[in-house]
Amino acid sequence: MSQPFVFLTEADVNLIDARLSLAEQNVKYLNERNIMLADSMQGMATEVAEAKGAMASASVLIQGFSARLAVVEAELAGVGAHSAALDTLRADLDVSEQELAAAVANNPLPPTEPAPPPAA
């Protein structure tokens, strides 16, 4: 079975050219937008890594202070002394640790999903 010939007018060709040009512009725009989104995601990943490092450092710092306070409290208890100032420091550290834990708990990272396969 033979295919019939299709004759295109100059207006038809111009319309096809215009639509192809628009499609090319859309592809270019989408590629540029994709690059911008990838850059933005990389920036956010860097910020999250920095925040995680800062939170871990703060936790270690608080725990270190707490351990040093426990040593001082034990030494004072060993000689039968007690310090209200140490009680205040202990309470302040406990509050700071709870605030840090609450901040982390209130801002959980969303579960990571595998990236979709690239479109062919």
Image (spheres, rainbow, N blue to C red):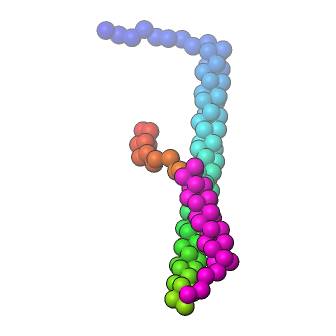
Whether 12 is drawn above or below 27: the answer is above
Q: Point out residue 15 in the picture as x, y percentages from the top left corner.
A: 64, 19
Q: Is residue 73 magenta?
A: no
Whether 20 is drawn above or below 6: the answer is below
Task: Please provide the residue range marked out in magenta.
Answer: 80-107
Residue plotted at (66% across, 14% down): 11
Q: Quadrant of the N terminus?
A: top left
Quadrant assignment, res 24:
top right
The answer to whether residue 101 is seen in the rendering is yes
Q: Residue furthest bottom?
A: 79
State the residue in front, 111 or 113. 111
Whether 3 is drawn above or below 79: the answer is above
State the residue in front, 12 or 19. 19
Quadrant assignment, res 119:
top left
Residue plotted at (54% across, 73% down): 63
Q: Point out residue 47 in the picture as x, y percentages from the top left corner.
A: 62, 59
Whether 89 is drawn above or below 81: the answer is above
